[in-house]
Image: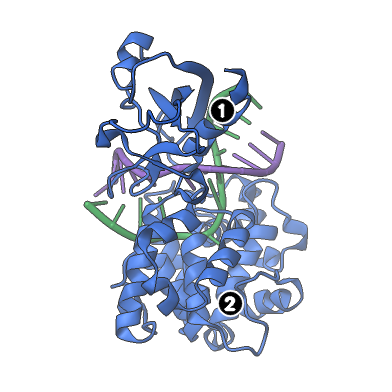
Chain colours: A blue, B purple, C green
Amino acid sequence: MTPDASDLLRWYDTHRRTLPWRSLPGQRPNPYAVWLSEIMLQQTTVKAVIAYYERFLTHYPTVQDLAAAPQEDVLYLWAGLGYYARARNLHACAKRVAELGQFPDTVEDLLKLPGIGAYTARAIAAIAFGRPVVPVDGNVERVTSRLFAIENPLPASRLLLAKQAALLNQSAEAQDHPSDFAQALFDLGATICTPRNPSCLTCPWRPSCLGHARGIASTLPRKAPKQARPTRYGVHFILLDTSERVLMRTRPEKGLLGGMDEFPGTEWHEAPWTEADAMHHAPTLGPWSLRGDVTHVFTHFTLKLMVYAKTLPAGHNAGIDPSFGAFRSTTRAALPGVMKKCLALAVTDMEKK
DNA sequence: GAATCGTGGCC
DNA sequence: TGGCCAAGATT
């Protein structure tokens, strides 16, 4: 009845994905590499992570290197990957590990580190240190809900799913290969037991899958309905000087896009801004050139921005209130995706203004 | 438990 | 086109 771990491990031997952070069979895993990849992979696709992972390892080959880096450098390297609290916690965690001298090797101690929760602690413990625990991510929740035909909707069913997932780990085979078993679950979820159109015909666990037997596998896991995503509106001003530097400021450490750079502008409100009201938030008096609009979808709201730009004549870049920021090169700025969209609008065709 | 927190790709 | 989804953590 309970799926056989040996069947999954055998499948994994021939179907495992090759990924930059994975050590080859027989190689000793690098806890720093495992940790870095796990943080980046939180709510983020493998495809998006790979380039960032390589960049971080190049700039910071060890956790000591990362710990010694200025936070602005870390945020710059992270810019575009999203969920920026991860980058701030990553840096804080690196500093803590550097103090400790090494990564903790138990779930209990890993949980004490910033940015490491129930999933990541178990992933690191299993993959880097061979602890016989099952990290329960979205893949494992999906696989488990189908194997046991659990129809209770997420997120309320999360605890039950974790308990059932732990059952998969009971056999001696699984206990002896925690790293492979955990990653086999990920790969099964990513390539066979996918959210839509799962490939049940080639699944090593199909014979014991209750969801498949009942014909409801592809409909699991059930999820509670999500609430509507409101729209907010804002206006940003991109002010260039004759050296192609741009007026930018850094957002507060906490909250949305915390610690990241932005172009000065209005608050993001529920109602559209009139041009007259928006101009009260401009760093200089007009005239401004309207460059266009940007739509950007965040997790819990859609943002619609109007973007104005202007190039300041030589010698006029002094006397701007510091609350609007300072003139800096954008090449090393920690610009989140939404601000990169604004910048692209401003610098396109700028000579035509 | 419910909110908050990014971004890109897919159908 | 818009909703859904991706190796979740924090408050």
Say if A330 sits above or below A206 in the image.
above
Question: Which residue matches tag 1?
Answer: A345
Horizontally, residue A43 falls left or right of residue A106, namely right
Whether residues under marks 2 and 1 lie with C-beta atoms below 8 angstroms apart, the answer is no
Can see residue A113? yes
* Quadrant (top left, top right, bottom left, bottom right) of the N terminus of chain A: bottom right
Give the quadrant of residue A15: bottom right
User: Is any part of residue A192 visible from this angle?
Assistant: no
Which mark is first along the chain, 1 or 2? 2
Quick one: A177 or A323, which is closer to the camera? Answer: A323
Q: Which of A102 and A346 is in front in this view?
A: A346
Residue A282 location, x and y as percent? 34, 22
Same chain, labels 2 and 1: yes
Give the chain of mark 2: A
- Tag 1, which chain? A
Q: Can you say whether A26 is above or below A275 in the image? A: below
Which residue is depicted at the point 41% across and 26% down?
A237
Q: Disc 1 marks which amino acid?
A: Leu
What amino acid is found at the position of numbered circle 2 in the picture? Answer: Phe
Give how far apart the Cα atoms at labels 2 and 1 are: 47 Å
Farthest residue in the front direction? A315
Tell me the residue at 38%/14% (across/down). A286
Q: Is residue A107 above or below residue A149?
A: below
**Looking at the image, which is closer to me, A281 or A213?**
A281
Crowding at dot 1, Cα within 10 Å, few <14 / some 14-19 / many 20+, comes out as many
Where A314 falls versus A151 (above or below)?
above
Q: Point out which mark residue A181 bears.
A: 2
Residue at horizontal 32%, vertical 38%? A325
Local crowd size for mark 2, using a 10 Å CA cut-off: few (<14), some (14–19), many (≥20) = many
